[in-house]
Amino acid sequence: MAWRLDPTNVGTGLPLEGVRVLDLSRVLAGPLCAMIAGDLGADVIKVEGPDGDPVRGLAPPRLGEDSTYYLSVNRHRRNIVANLREPEDFDRVAALVREADAVVENFLPSQVSSLGIDRLRQQNPDCVWISITPASSGGPLANQPSFDLLAQARSGLMGVTGMADGEPTKVGSPIADVVTGLYGAIGLLTGLYAKAQGRSARHFEAPLLESTMSALINQAQGYLSTGENPQRLGNDHPSIAPYGPVATADGFLLLAVGTDNQFARLVQVLADEELTSRIEWRTNAVRVATLVDLSATLDRIFSRYSTVEWLERLATSSVPHGPIYDVAGAFAQAQIRDGDFLGTMDTPGGETLAMRTPLLIDGVRPALRRGPRRLGQDTDEVFDR
């Protein structure tokens, strides 16, 4: 059995054209990692068990028989069904591993043992192997199943998300899975580069817990350097003010005033007597320390006009600001609506709009070449049956 490139991945001119990636992963972080490789031109084959990737059923919403959750991270790959517990199927997958440049998987350590994943790795020692894990191997959480929400909770991310007097709040998108998938993709690309340079860097582990904790960035470093435990601040920033929403006559506007010079321009534009007289607010440290007073003053000023009016007044001010959109509003803004970030993708349930990769390569955004496939749609072709 030979791994023949799919015609949709031939002649693309994309950076990873000709690279073969075997996707043994499920749900989100692993499939996202493999999808990024596919977006960049790799020939990806996804292996699902007889029951399919469980994310296929995470609906509503769905398009046709598949959840839109599944559709979001499973484009640019052929789809085969194989039961690794069956010797014949195991041997077929092993043959693919022998020809793969990279493999992505997210099996628990117990599953690695029971399914013979180490035996698969031995088929191709030079293959770049990406393991998406619950937590770094060898630790007490390494063999405990985990999901995005659990990672957000355990990582401390929920501890700094939400209103100060409210309950801990998860981020509205599966940020833990996304960050982990991106680290997996970094590992995959790094491994391919190292291999091309004749260096040894073959097994990359992207642990969900540690990857999510890395997203704490400044919050984590503040704690590690000072011992001060960050608290929930709602939409306020721990180190910058004003850096959040202000109330307008009919809604909200976001201010992201990151420097003292930007605040000085804001004061000039607003031309409010009280704001101008508060000389102490010229420095960010004082603004952060007196945020409650500052916010009340800004809300009073901005409540004079509507959001649209303030957007017009601030348009040429060089003060960082912007509207606060819901999802529909984000897709309706001219930058997105009139650009090429959205494209049409074919799916088993029909065509749909989808986000293309955010990456531009030499000024060009790669096209959507193929959407997600039906469960096992390409099994016979790939296995020469």
Image: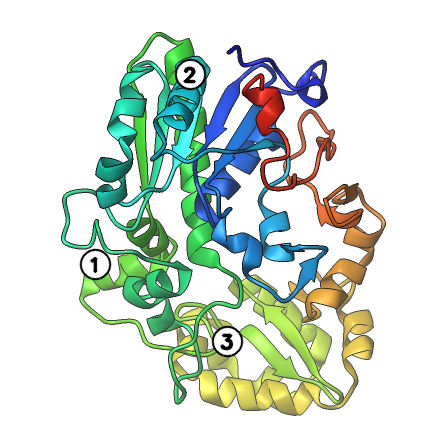
**Marks 3, 1: nearer the viewer:** 3
In the figure, 34 relative to 94: above or below? below
The Cα atoms of the two marked residues, 3 and 1, are separated by 23 Å
**What residue is drawn where x is 79% and y is 84%?**
306
Report the amino acid beneath label 2. Ala
The Cα atoms of the two marked residues, 2 and 1, are separated by 50 Å
Element at label 1 = helix
In terms of sequence position, does the residue under pointer 2 or pointer 1 come before the other?
2
Q: Which residue is mark 3?
A: 235
Report the amino acid beneath label 3. Asn
Position of residue 166 measured from the top left corner of the image (x, y, whole percent): 41, 87
In the figure, 198 relative to 37: above or below? above
In terms of sequence position, does the residue under pointer 3 or pointer 1 come before the other?
1
Q: Which residue is mark 2?
A: 95
User: Disc 3, disc 1: CB below 8 Å?
Assistant: no
In terms of sequence position, does the residue under pointer 2 or pointer 3 come before the other?
2
Which of 320 and 336 lies nearest the eye of the viewer? 336
